[in-house]
């Protein structure tokens, strides 16, 4: 998008990046006013969410195992 702001036309940018005009328009609509760091942020958050989901699954599994052990010992 910065190339377009610098005076390059849309067709020239699409050729330079080897993308179609439709792809350019979709990306411009999605990332038009954002910086590069803003575009990377969702991927960072996605990785962090995956890590947290895994920790939650492990905690839930540990809890289920403890309940089973307690039930077998007659403490439940």
Image (cartoon, rainbow, N blue to C red):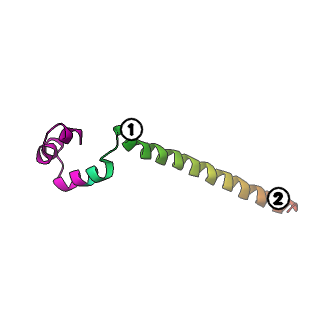
Which comes before the other along the chain, label 2 or label 1?
Answer: 1
Spot occupied by residue 61 in the image (x, y as percentages of width and height): 67, 55
The residue carrying pointer 2 sits among few (fewer than 14), some (14 to 19) or many (20 or more) residues within 10 Å by Cα, namely: few
At 23% from the left edge and 39% from the top edge, which residue is drawn? 2
In magenta, the rendered stretch is: 1-25
As measured in the structure, the alpha-carbon distance from the residue carrying label 2 to the one carrying label 1 is 49 Å
| Residue 57 in picture, x, y percent from top left | 62, 54
Q: Nearer the viewer, residue 35 or 19?
A: 35
Which image quarter: residue 68?
bottom right
Q: Position of residue 50 (x, y in %)?
A: 52, 49
Quadrant assignment for the C terminus:
bottom right
Residue at mark 2:
70
Residue 20: image location, x then y, percent: 17, 52
Magenta region's main secondary structure?
Answer: helix
Q: Mark 2, mark 1: which one is toward the viewer?
A: 1
Left or right of residue 15, residue 35 in this image: right
**Secondary element at tag 2:** helix
Badge 1 crowding class, 10 Å Cα cut-off, few under 14, some 14 to 19, many 20 or more, is few
Q: Is residue 46 left or right of residue 72?
A: left
Q: Is residue 54 above or below residue 38?
A: below
Q: Which mark is residue 37?
A: 1
User: Camera-side residue: 23 or 55?
Assistant: 23
Give the camera-side residue of 67 and 19. Answer: 19
Numbered badge on residue 28: none
Q: Is residue 3 above or below residue 54?
A: above
Image point 20% across, 40% down: which residue? 5
Outermost residue to the right: 74
Is 16 inside the magenta-drawn segment?
A: yes
Seen at 29% across and 47% down, the residue is 32
User: For the residue labelled by badge 1, is the local secondary structure a helix, a strand or a loop?
Assistant: helix
**Depth check: 14 or 31 in front?**
31
* Quadrant of the frame with the N terminus: top left
């Amino acid at each position: 998008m910065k190339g377009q702001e610098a005076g390059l036309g849309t067709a020239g940018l699409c050729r330079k990046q080897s993308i179609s005009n439709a792809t350019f328009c979709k990306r411009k609509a999605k990332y038009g006013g954002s910086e590069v760091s803003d575009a990377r942020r969702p991927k960072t958050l996605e990785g962090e969410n995956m890590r947290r989901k895994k920790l939650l699954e492990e905690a839930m599994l540990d809890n289920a195992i403890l309940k089973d052990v307690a039930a077998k010992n007659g403490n439940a």
